[in-house]
Amino acid sequence: MRTIDLFCGAGGLGEGFRQAGFSAAYANDHEAPAIATYTVNHPNAVCSSDAIETVGPKKIREQLGVARGEIDVVMGGPPCQGFSTYGQRREDDSRNQLYVPYFGFVEEFRPKAFLIENVVGLLSMSGGAVLDDMVARATALGYAADVVTLNACEYGVPQNRRRVFIFGASHNQKIAPPVQTHASNLVGKGKKIKPESVILREVGMPSALTVRDAISDLPNEVCVPSDTQKPMTYPEAPHTDYQRNMRGNSHQLTHHSSKRMLGIRRLRLAMLHPGDYGTKIEDRLASGGLTDEIINSMMGGEGMRDAAECRTEDRVKEEALREMLKAGRTTPEQVMQFLESQGFANKYRRLEWDKPSHTVVAHMARDCSDFVHPGIDRFVSVREAARFQSFPDSYCFPGSQFRQFRQIGNAVPPLLGKAVAETIKATIA
């Protein structure tokens, strides 16, 4: 079964569909580095980084040599910058309209089914007008258009990640949502209480996979960013079925590199316990103190950046902290006061071993402060982030560490994509 994969990114959705028995005939994304990643991992697809507004669907269909109706699924995730509730949200962002050429492909190829994935902010964008227009365009072309919100952790992905899916089949044929496989067990601010019928369905389900399930078999030591393509050996056998699944037939580990940091940042991480966020640690430090061992080990050692490489602003902070510690001002109150004065009060968040990861984001390319390893005073590696997204270890991300984090954060988790692919396949096969 064949797909057209638009706004394909690094290929997370495409990988999920591949695992469900589909093959990408054509893939498009305006970011050339993402297309390079897609091409390496999906070598049989015709790939293009041309702006989708400039691509003629008819020309592509003729190039592929397929008749209308022969492609099984047109799928994709139009850019979410304007829809996202993460960061600035702009209703006048021109990228909000890129779903229009997407439907141009649906109209030209007349696939058996279509699929759109996006952030939950789409539901309320422009008072729901954007979503209504998507549904209206699908309906006008003869497709049913169901809208569902799915959480990746309920489909075997060790990450709390809610996304909207719009899908339907030709001749107004409805497609059932994928059947939930894992109980989320998630509670938190703003989370709605599930109806009794949903709770009953979750009885007997395995719990959502955790950070421990995902990465506890990976090495503690990581590569520096410039060595992100360097292969490593697995230090031990996999501990969980998920880890075995992610390893597959891989015998080497790649992309196990993390961002380096200055001592001032490492010191902050050393004081975080799993689940700590912001200034929560202050009360605990007031009674527990800061040991000389922490000061000595966290201000130096492997994985640290040379202050001489850094911008003047960060170098001054680093030197000021060292002078303060040398002067004997090491009480919790003094250290906390210094860190807060330098803007480090609410910056970092440590993952918890026995909970799913929070949502992996593209901003990790610039800042991993929200993704501190649960047991080591460092940020998570590229491969660990890929594990949270359910990319198999064999999945290759060419290019720099910056591009790797960006592509992984933007991706659809392959196992979530696989769940959606299987329910579509069951309808149209």
Image (spheres, rainbow, N blue to C red):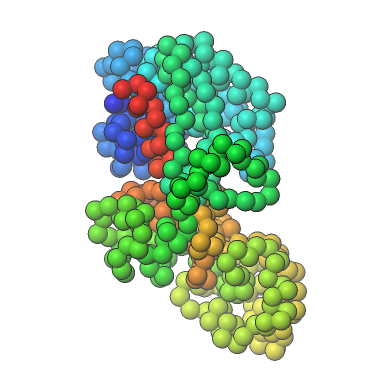
Q: Position of residue 53 (x, y in %)?
A: 48, 22
Please state if 33 lies on the left or on the right of 366 as rendered: left
Q: Position of residue 230 (x, y in %)?
A: 32, 61
Residue at 48% in and 51% down: 208
Camera-side residue of 186 and 291: 186
- Which corner quadrant of the image does residue 401 belong to? bottom left
**Quadrant location of the C terminus in the rendered image:** top left
Residue 423 visible in rendering: yes
**Quadrant location of the N terminus in the rendered image:** top left
Camera-side residue of 48 and 238: 238
Residue 393 visible in rendering: no
Q: Position of residue 311 (x, y in %)?
A: 60, 65
Give the mark count. 0
Q: Is residue 47 above or below residue 218?
A: above
Q: Is residue 51 above or below residue 331?
A: above
- Which corner quadrant of the image does residue 276 belong to? bottom right
Q: Is residue 289 above or below residue 392?
A: below
Please state if 258 lies on the left or on the right of 298 as rendered: left
Residue at 54% in and 62% down: 352
Q: Position of residue 315 (x, y in %)?
A: 62, 71
Q: Is residue 109 above or below residue 282?
A: above
Residue at 46% in and 39% down: 180
Please state if 94 lies on the left or on the right of 62 as rendered: right
Residue at 36% in and 32% down: 422
Please state if 258 lies on the left or on the right of 149 as rendered: left
